[in-house]
Every structure is written in structure tokens, then in C-alpha cells.
Image (cartoon, grey):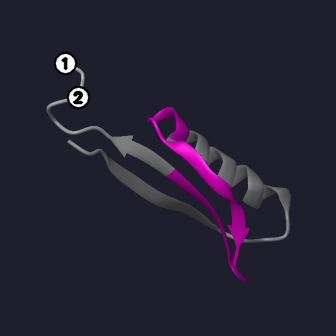
Amino acid sequence: MPSSLDYQIVAVPFHADAATHDELARKVNEKLQSGYELYGTPFLSEDMMYQAVIRILLPAAAAPGP
């Protein structure tokens, strides 16, 4: 049975100061602690800063038991 992929983009408003980077790092670290992995490098738009994260979802039959 094939696995599924959970792809999410973490986003924070972009300001040209260190607080933006700290806020993005905090949110990304929360995702990493819950089983996600980084996917690519951070990227920007005019007013937002982003980081993609992924997590492989195992089929129910292959998921580890309690």
C-alpha cells in the first residue's frame, strides 16, 4: 500500500528584522518536533516569509501499534 505525503507551508509576515526569522524558526521547529521534515529552503514574497515542510503518512495497516 503506498504512503501519502502531508505537505504544508509555514508562513509569517515579512519584516526586514530578526524577529521575522525568529518567528519563522519557532513555527518551523514546532512542525519539526511533531514529525515534519524541512522541504527546500525558506522563500519570500513581498510581505511574507515561508518554509515548506513534509511528513510521510504511513497507511493505517503499516502504522506502528501503541
Residue on which the image places disc 1: 65
Q: Is residue 23 magenta?
A: no
Q: Which residue occupies the extreme front position in the image?
A: 1
For the N terminus, give its image quadrant.
top left
Instruction: Please rate how many residues cluster around mark 2, counting C-alpha atoms within 10 Å: few if below 14, some from 14 to 19, many from 20.
Output: few
At x 85%, y 63%, the residue is 17
Q: Which residue occupies the extreme bottom position in the image?
A: 46
Mark drawn on residue 63: 2
Secondary-structure class at tag 1: loop
Amino acid found under the numbered disc labelled 2: Ala
Q: Is residue 58 left or right of residue 41?
A: left
Compute the Cα span from label 1 to label 2: 6 Å
Instruction: Please rate how many residues cluster around mark 1, counting C-alpha atoms within 10 Å: few if below 14, some from 14 to 19, many from 20.
Output: few
Residue contact at pointers 1 and 2, CB within 8 angstroms? yes
- Write the start and end of the magenta stretch as one range: 32-53
Q: Magenta span: helix, strand or loop, mainly? A: strand
Q: Is residue 29 left or right of residue 46?
A: left
Q: Position of residue 50 (x, y in %)?
A: 63, 65
